[in-house]
Image: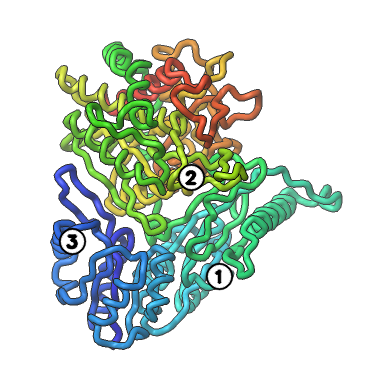
């Protein structure tokens, strides 16, 4: 009889670690449905809770708490890293059946690949566990939504079948994983599926190509729709061609999945360095890693923003809030935070360690996470680390919350904590050019996004002071620092996916990504609210950006405001705020003059370079303070202060 082994993090459940080290598992959508469907099969775990017996005991206890009575055979519980065959071979041995009768269910393609090397079958999502048991393949498929059908209709069918959405491009196009049975259910329900290859050990990406598209003269007189289709096809073909050429591998490691918004969908084999490939003229955030989620079609934020949007119209900060923000968020405070996380000063005051990089691959990354969590905990906030996996590494987002009992929603103030120097020039010992080594090369990221991280910390300090002075918000306030933004917004996608699964109510998300780069001239603040997701989120995000604009006169009077909205927003889909748009929540990204190319930019010239330091001539903490104060005041006002 077959034996199923499940990964836990992001596959069975989302993991949250409290400041005291306590672990809580929040089951993912459709997981209990799957476990009930395979109740007659033996089930085990292959998961990495971290080093040490204490971590394993903590994980085992959390598993039993979240899935009581469902994983009862302790001999089938295997704890440890999944970067080599050993743990999978041990799992097969414990099952007492041939390896081919064992199935590993896990989201990470690298882990599925190792499981297959051990002779096991593998499934990319619990929904496909039974398909793996029965040896049925799972495909990438494009769903063209007919004009007389809706995403709600598609969700109803998908949630009852072997179908898992991966990306919603528009009300008319959805990328999914589906077995043949799932495809049949879709087609029976009136949703034709265009199959694009097996999922196996691949993961999906959206790769945007920002280069202009020129069509032959024959397209001059065609309809606008035909022209858009032709442009999308050309752009997708060119983007895929770049990737294939850049990889230059004898065995293709990527497969085209068809045109996507602004580029191409691809399925990449485990370990393919898609995130490291940058087409000519690529703008920031051109690569987006796509995560499977049965709840992706529901967009829970849409119903919420309909109720909240009216509040955004009148959000001028009170004099008391303006005074508190000015006192707490100063150039000196921002400089101090940036100095610690970019390697100028010790990471923790009084200790010797200075960091070289916050890259997701760097050994300094988890040290920075711990330091940030500790600093936020010291402010009296409830701190949690939200864990997720990326290329075999256990990474964490950091969340610090001031919870308000009975609040109707939460306000999020966010940035990304990781860095990269992928555009830098590096040389070997012989002076020859070499690629960026993300695990060892310096990536101080003082502006990107040390400046945004510093602003979130300063905003948290401001709220802590206000609370100590007797003021309290009417809404819950969360300060969230995302990891692995530079790898396709992986951390924020994992966070937003978990928040949606948990039923979180979020009134608005304020994201700061690069706020200290200033070369001189007019001080410009870009306010990005453009969403690649249609529906109520569009107007709500624009209104949320309006709150930032209303706060600016009192806190950044000398700034020129540059609202960028709609489909033409150059940051649409390209920073962590987009992960919340994907769920229907209102979100705005605020930054230096970097994305808007209608005039010469005044933002940093050290983007993704080792020269992005606190001492760089483009790094201006006075300028950063103006943006940080404005965003903090808007967020605190929305929170009821």
Q: Under tag 2, what secondary structure?
A: loop
Few, some or many residues within 10 Å of mark 2 (<14, 14–19, 20+): some
Q: Is residue 113 above or below residue 478?
A: below
Check residue 535 in the rendering and tell me which mark sits there, or answer none. Answer: 2
Frontmost residue, 225 versus 428: 428
Which class describes the residues within 10 Å of circle 1: few (<14), some (14-19), or many (20+)? many
**Closer-to-camera residue (114/311):** 114
User: Residue under circle 3?
Assistant: 56
- Residue under circle 1? 193
Q: Are marks 2 and 1 in contact (CB under 8 Å)?
A: no
Q: Between marks 3 and 2, how big is the CA–CA gap? A: 44 Å
**Residue sitting farthest toward the right:** 217
Q: Disc 2 vs disc 1: which is toward the camera?
A: 1
Q: Nearer the viewer, mark 1 or mark 3?
A: 3
Residue 142, position as x, y percentages in the image: 56, 64
The answer to whether marks 3 and 2 mark residues whose Cβ atoms lie closer than 8 Å is no
Q: Say whether disc 3 or disc 2 marks the residue closer to the N-terminus.
A: 3
- The residue under the point 35% across, 43% down is 365
Q: Earlier in the sequence, mark 1 or mark 3?
A: 3
Q: Position of residue 26 (x, y in %)?
A: 24, 56
Q: Please name the residue shown 26% across and 36% down the image.
A: 371
> Element under label 3?
helix
Q: CA distance from mark 2 to mark 1?
A: 24 Å
**Nearer the observer, 62 or 588:** 62
């Amino acid at each position: 009889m077959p034996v199923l082994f499940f990964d836990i993090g992001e596959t069975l459940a989302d993991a949250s670690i409290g400041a005291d080290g306590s672990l809580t598992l929040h089951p993912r959508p459709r997981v209990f449905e799957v476990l009930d469907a395979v109740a007659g099969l033996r089930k085990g775990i292959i998961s990495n809770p971290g080093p040490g017996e204490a971590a394993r005991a903590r994980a085992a206890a959390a598993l039993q708490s979240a899935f009581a009575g469902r994983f009862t055979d302790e001999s089938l519980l295997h704890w440890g890293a999944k970067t080599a065959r050993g743990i999978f071979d041990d799992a097969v041995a414990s099952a007492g059946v041939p390896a081919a009768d064992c199935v590993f269910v896990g989201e990470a393609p690298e882990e599925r690949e190792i499981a297959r090397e051990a002779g096991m079958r593998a499934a990319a999502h619990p929904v496909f566990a039974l398909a793996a048991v029965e040896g049925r393949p799972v495909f990438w498929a494009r769903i063209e939504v007919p004009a007389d059908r809706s995403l709600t209709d598609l969700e109803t069918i998908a949630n009852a079948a072997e179908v898992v959405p991966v990306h919603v491009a528009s009300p008319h196009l959805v990328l999914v994983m589906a077995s043949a049975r799932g495809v049949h259910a879709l087609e029976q329900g009136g949703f034709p599926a265009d199959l694009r290859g097996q999922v196996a050990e691949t993961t999906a990406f959206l790769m945007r190509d920002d280069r202009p598209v020129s069509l032959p003269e024959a397209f001059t007189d065609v309809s606008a729709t035909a022209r858009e289709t032709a442009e999308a096809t050309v752009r997708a073909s060119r983007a895929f061609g770049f990737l294939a050429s850049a990889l230059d591998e004898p065995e293709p490691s990527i497969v085209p999945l068809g045109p996507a918004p602004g580029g191409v969908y691809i399925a990449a084999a485990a370990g393919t360095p898609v995130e490291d490939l940058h087409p000519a003229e690529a703008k920031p955030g051109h690569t987006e890693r796509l995560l499977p989620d049965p709840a992706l079609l529901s967009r829970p934020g849409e119903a919420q923003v309909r109720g909240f949007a009216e509040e955004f119209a009148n959000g001028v900060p009170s004099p008391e809030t303006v005074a508190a923000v000015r006192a707490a968020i100063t150039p000196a405070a921002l400089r101090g935070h940036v100095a610690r996380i970019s390697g100028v000063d010790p990471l923790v005051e009084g200790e010797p360690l200075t960091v070289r990089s916050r890259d997701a691959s760097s050994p300094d990354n988890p040290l920075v996470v711990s330091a940030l969590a500790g600093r936020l905990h010291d402010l009296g906030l409830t701190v949690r680390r939200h864990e997720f996996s990326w290329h075999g590494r256990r990474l964490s987002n950091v969340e610090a919350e001031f919870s308000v009992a009975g609040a109707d929603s939460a306000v999020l103030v966010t940035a990304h904590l990781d860095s990269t120097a992928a555009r830098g020039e590096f040389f070997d010992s012989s002076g020859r050019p070499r690629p960026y080594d993300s695990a060892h090369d310096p990536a101080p990221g003082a502006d990107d996004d040390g400046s945004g991280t510093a602003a979130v910390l300063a905003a948290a300090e401001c709220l802590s002071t206000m609370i100590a002075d007797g003021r309290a918000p009417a809404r819950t306030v969360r300060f969230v620092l995302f990891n692995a933004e530079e790898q396709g917004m992986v951390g924020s996608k994992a966070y937003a996916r978990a928040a949606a699964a948990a039923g979180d109510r979020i009134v608005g998300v304020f994201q700061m990504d690069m706020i200290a780069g200033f070369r001189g001239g007019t001080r410009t603040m870009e306010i990005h609210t453009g969403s690649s997701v249609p529906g109520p989120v569009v107007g709500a995000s624009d209104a949320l950006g309006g709150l930032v604009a209303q706060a600016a006169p009192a806190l950044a009077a000398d700034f020129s405001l540059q609202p960028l909205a709609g489909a033409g927003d150059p940051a649409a889909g390209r920073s962590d705020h987009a992960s919340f748009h994907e769920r229907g929540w209102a979100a705005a990204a605020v930054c230096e003059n970097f994305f808007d190319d209608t005039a010469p930019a005044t933002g940093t010239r050290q983007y993704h370079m080792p020269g992005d330091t606190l001492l760089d001539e483009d790094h201006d903490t006075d300028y950063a303070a103006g943006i940080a104060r404005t965003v903090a005041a808007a967020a605190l006002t929305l929170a009821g202060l």
